[in-house]
Amino acid sequence: MEIYEPREDTFLILKQIEHFASGNVLDMGTGSGVLAIEAAQTADNVIGVDINKDAVEFASEQAKDYPNVQFFHSDLFSYFKKNPMKFDLIIFNPPYLPEDKKEPKESALATTGGKKGHEVLERFFSEVSEYLMPYGRILVIFSSLTGKDKTHEILEEYAFDYQKLAEKEEFMETLFVYIIEKSDLLRAVEWKGIKNVKKIAKGHRGFIFIGNLEGKKVVVKKQRDDKPVTGRIVNEARWLKVLNRKGIGPKFLFLDVKNNYFCYEYVEGEFIPSFLEKAPKDEIKKVLKDVFEQCFKMDMMGIDKEEMHNPYKHVLVEDGKAVLLDFERVHSTEKPKNVTQFMQYVGNKRNTKILKEKGIKVDMRKWRAAARRYKKEENKENFKKILSLLS
């Protein structure tokens, strides 16, 4: 099998190695082994791995005079699944070019990063944190053909901080060398035992990450550092703890005030707009009443959640039970409007049409009258009259 010979990208990243190679170093996709050998000049121990067995054999021969270097066959981190290790520096000169169907399969293994060029990099960053020391670093090179913005997106998705060290224009492409490390958030959540962290949403005020804690899927909600509003995460976490006592919201796990995030159990489920379209009549009635019951509890507590008039991402349905999400705007008030806001949502044109098709008739004249009556006097009797209209 063809071995990737040192080229311009190799020499560009090689110049940076002496500044960062110390302790235990991993050279991912080692190829000829030249980067591993360079790292061995200053590091205590170096391991080079490659998917190409011929490359492993060749690199081992090249490094025979370096007792602190070893080489193993591995498809990215597959070797370390059975031989777990953590590194102070991980070097990666990946295959980063977009797929060229005319290129021979053997050479493509060393040059092609996937259909669009970034797939191998994405796979690498989805796994690398488990093998990197808390303050370890990653030295990586990629091309403008890989997509600079896409690479940044991948790094942010897996909660890494990054800095450009070098840049060089080549024929039809630009090469970039980056130094990368775990963000403060990633270090903090991993210290708590959360693994496989990945960003799934970005909002106006915060980021949502998912991860695994003791075999269970969890959510990490982090306030954006570039927003001037402070205290929202703490406020939301505290309200979620309060509401959990009434059976409302996903299960709160913990709050990290210093790092401005909190963690709660992940809820598998379907958002309510999709649920209403797909579910049968009896399930819909059960879930709508469940949401109304939770809204009524909040009204009786003098709490306003906000946005229940358009809760398209605020209500998940899991196993026939509604789970309310997103409590960042919750506040105390003498006139909460959770029930009446959700009545607005149920009674809009789109939803009344869906409900009618499912065999659930909502008399809008009575619906509006019930809303006015409840708004005037929020009590159990008026609330029950609302539920009775969902026939």
Image: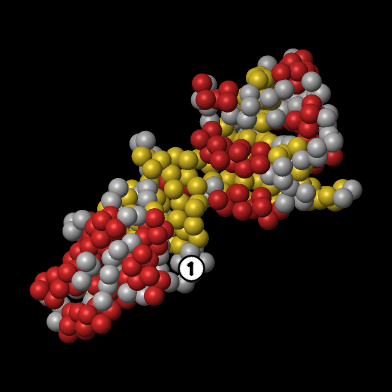
Residue 4 is situated, as x and y percent measured from the top left of the image, at: 80, 29
Residue 252 in sight: no
Q: Mark 1 highlights which residue?
A: 204
Query: Relative to the observer, which residue lies in front, 325 or 34?
Result: 325
Residue at x 78%, y 49% (from the top left corner)? 145
Residue 307 is situated, as x and y percent measured from the top left of the image, at: 35, 72
- Dividing the picture into quadrants, the one containing residue 21 is top right
Query: Relative to the observer, which residue lies in front, 16 or 41?
Result: 16
Residue 137 is situated, as x and y percent measured from the top left of the image, at: 60, 41
Relative to 215, say whether 233 is above or below. Answer: below
Please state, as top left, top right, bottom left or bottom right, where the C terminus lies in the image: bottom left
- Dividing the picture into quadrants, the one containing residue 314 is bottom left
Relative to 312, say whether 144 is above or below. Answer: above
- Is residue 115 left or right of 104 when viewed as pictured? left
- Dividing the picture into quadrants, the one containing residue 376 is bottom left
- Is residue 381 left or right of 42 when viewed as pictured? left
